[in-house]
Amino acid sequence: MRFNDLGNKELIDLTSGSRLGVLGQTDLEIDEKTGQIISFTIPQYTMFGLRKTEVYSRIDWKQIKKIGDDMIIVETDKG
């Protein structure tokens, strides 16, 4: 699967059922040697999604449970 195929998928937290963001709005941490994705860094937005704050969430690749047609289900420690 290419990153372009993942770009518009929503990230949903399995633990809380909350929407974490859209994958296209995230930054990726990639292993330079293998080219594999290590984690996603998700910016938090202010009210109404107008502006990014300085707070970020990090989702490790191993936390991904399922990649569907419209969303990616992740399991975080937060509940």
Image: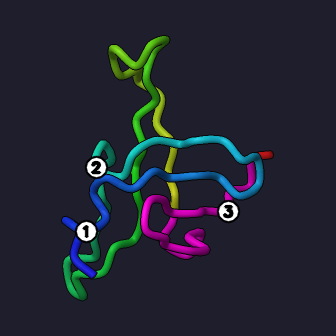
Residue 10 vs residue 79, the one in the foreground: 10
Give 13 or 55, whichever is nearer the viewer. Answer: 13
Alpha carbon distance from label 1 to label 2: 10 Å
Local secondary structure at mark 2: helix
Q: Is residue 55 above or below residue 61?
A: above
Residue placed furthest toward the right: 79
Q: Position of residue 25 (x, y in %)?
A: 30, 42
What residue is at 50 percent from the left and 51 percent from the top?
58
Q: For the magenta stretch, what is the residue range?
A: 60-78
Q: Earlier in the sequence, mark 1 or mark 3?
A: 1
Question: Which residue is denoted by mark 3 in the rendering?
Answer: 75
Q: Amino acid at mark 3?
A: Glu
* Apparent side of residue 58 relative to residue 36 in the rendered image (left or right): right
Quarter of the image for the N terminus: give it: bottom left
Label 2 environment density (alpha carbons within 10 Å; few <14, some 14–19, many ≥20): some
For marks 1 and 2, the one nearer the N-term is 1
